[in-house]
Image (spheres, helix red, strand yellow):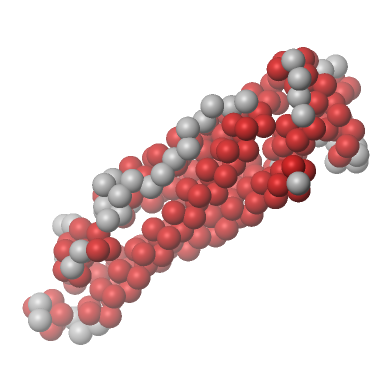
Amino acid sequence: MALSDLLYPDNPKRKQELIHLHQELLDCMSTNFHATNELVGVLNEHLGCTITPIEMRESSTVKENCENIIQVMSEIQHQVQKIDSDMKDKLEPVLYQKLYDIKEPELEKIAIAQRVFSIIFGEATSTAAMVAIKLLGSNHLTLTVSKLIGVLAQIGASVLGGVSITIIGLGLEMILHAILGAVERCQLLTAVRSYEKHLAEFKAASEKYQRAIHEVTSLVRQQVQ
């Protein structure tokens, strides 16, 4: 038994907590990668985007994987802004305002968007127009993307950022060494509390992000059936 475990009897329990929290973090991150790729697939197929899908890299650290998904989420934000810019450039001000008028019928908005896409691409499907309207009108998606980018950046900059995502398959002591680094074992409680805080924020932001993406992708699936 380690000396720190003798001096601090709760350490073994906290070590197990730390491993469990790390696995939760990785599971949540993996789900975000999957949800992001679903949205990327919709944008590429229906709006002519060329965003490269992403995958969790087992040889990389938590920070590097955070940076990877942040980059793609930023590309998604850029594409939504570009759609808005195209609509503003091609439409008369009155029609452009209709796109954001909550009282305006959804079908009317889709028809307006389809007109613009027909000008840009030569042709456009109602599915493409529907996706565009959903993205433009979804403050929920815009806010959740921004929130999750912020949380991911915090995680990447924290003590968690330098940990490899492959450490779960290693021995307990090696995992703890990777997680804690220079942190003394007597500070396990601090490490656990830090993990809990970041994980709580990450899970809350992730759930909203995934729900927002599901709203878009489920509509597309219904449309193409």
The x and y percentages for residue 12 are: 22, 79
Horizontal side, residue 121 vs residue 51: left or right: right
Closer to us: 162 or 75: 75
Tell how many labels.
Answer: 0
- Give the image location of residue 44, x and y in percent: 59, 31
Residue shown at 52%/43% (left/top)?
A: 37
Q: Residue at x 71, y 17 (%)?
A: 121
Please say whether residue 144 is visible from this viewpoint: yes
Q: Nearer the viewer, residue 102 or 41?
A: 41
Q: Quadrant of the N terminus?
A: bottom left
Q: Quadrant of residue 138?
A: top right
Residue 132's place in the image compared with 60, above or below, is above
Vertical order, 142 against 174 (above or below):
above
In the image: residue 76, left or right of residue 10 = right
Q: Is residue 72 above or below residue 28?
A: above
Residue at 76% in and 24% down: 124
Asked which quadrant contains residue 5, the reply is bottom left
Tell me where residue 43 appears, x and y as whole percent.
62, 34
Tell me if I can see residue 193 in this picture: no
- Residue 49 lies, in percent from the top left, at 59, 27
Q: Position of 141 compared to 130: left or right?
A: left
Residue reaching furthest to the front:
225
Location of residue 13 (image quadrant)? bottom left
| Left or right relative to 111: residue 62 | left
In this rendering, the answer to whether 23 lies above or below 81 is below
User: As rendered, which of 37 and 20 lies closer to the eye?
Assistant: 37
